[in-house]
Amino acid sequence: MKRILADVVSFGKQYMRNIAGPFFAFAFPILLILVFGAIFTTDDPAKITLPVQDLDEGEYSDAYLRNLSLTGIVDIEYIPAEVNIAEYIKDESLGIALVIPETFTHDLTEALSGNATGQVLLVVYGDETRSTYGIAVGAIHSAAEIMNYDLMGAYPLVSFEPRSVVSEAFNYMDFFLPGVVGIVVMTNSLFSMTSVCAEYRNRGYFKLLATTKIAKWEWLVSKFIFFTLLLTGSLLVTYAVGIAVFNMESSLTLVSFVLIAAGAFLFVSMGMLLGVVIRDPESGAAAANAIGFPMMFLSGAFFPLESMPEYLQLIAKVLPLTYLNEGLRDTMVYSNNESALVNLAVVVVLGLVFFVLASRLMSWKEK
């Protein structure tokens, strides 16, 4: 045990001496939650600017535009009636624009008097690939529905009552934090151990270790202990910042700390395996990036798995980070420790597989 602790202290000093180590363990997660929190937790979300060309300027077009403003989603920016809308959209690179035809009030009046049939149409020009397009179209549709009810003297008979399945005190950052923690566990453990093992093998450090009293398994265990302590500290600091800045209500549970340790074990083992297979640090770093970065974006850390295409969801289910993120979210947000323990079991089993492979392939006598 003394040899293990001595190696933990020695490796820890070496790791923390490099500024990249403490940055990715402590500064990186804090920057992530501050940036994403500033974007998604504002009490007054930014409205979408909606350019509108009102060619009618009549009673009903004015009424419609009032309803559109009342949605609270868009800020109307008026386009002069005399400009060519197609050229204006091209010149201004607009993602969406609404045109109210010049016969809007007349056509509505005729329809209400029974002298015309069919719908009175608004014209929406837009780029469907932009994220704001769907939101703006939703506001346009809502304003039209409100006007329909007003004109016909009707009201919606069927509606819905939203009921949250989680505490109303939770905010976006409560759901985002577990993903950040999972990313930090992966980046620090996987990237660091891949580079360390590749460098030790390339420079012959493993041969030197073979001349000492420390056993191979003791060296492996010391790395697991160090990263568990480092990442537990990172979790505590990040969680404290989240509470102080965003009033988070998620909780740190015993299962969450066990998941941190299991995640460190998994990605340390995976990094060791990559490091002993790949001979030079540069190739090791490239391999870790090739594995880690897709995992970062496909594991539900930034985007819900349900919002991904089905084939990406299938890929996500084979990624180790997915189970770490889901386990942390289960216990910290939903208080569902049964589901968290299932995810924990998957992380531990995968960690054991990588650990056994790494320990069998790691040789201190071969360069």
Image (tube, helix red, strand yellow):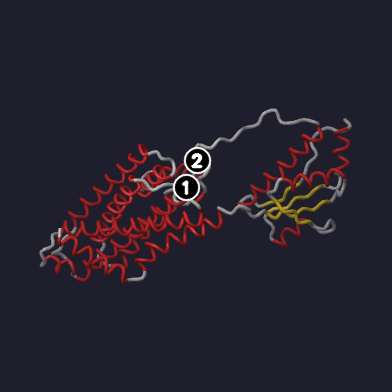
Residue 315 in view here: no
Find residue 24 and report its horizontal and vertical position in percent.
Answer: 38, 63
| Residue placed under numbered mark 2 in the picture | 167
Indicate whether 135 appears above or below 293: above
Residue closer to the observer: 345 or 136:
345
| Residue placed under numbered mark 1 in the picture | 249
Q: CA distance from mark 1 to mark 2?
A: 9 Å
Indicate whether 135 appears above or below 272: above
Residue 194 in view here: yes
User: In the displayed structure, does residue 333 sit left or right of residue 130?
Assistant: left
Local crowd size for mark 2, using a 10 Å CA cut-off: few (<14), some (14–19), many (≥20): few
Find residue 366 and report its horizontal and vertical position in percent.
Answer: 15, 64
Find residue 178 and report its horizontal and vertical position in percent.
Answer: 42, 50
- Quadrant in which the C terminus is drawn: bottom left
- Identified by mark 2, the residue type is Ser
Residue drawn at 28 percent across, 46 percent down? 350
Find residue 242 and report its horizontal and vertical position in percent.
Answer: 46, 55
**Callout 1 touching callout 2 (CB < 8 Å):** yes
Local crowd size for mark 1, using a 10 Å CA cut-off: few (<14), some (14–19), many (≥20): some
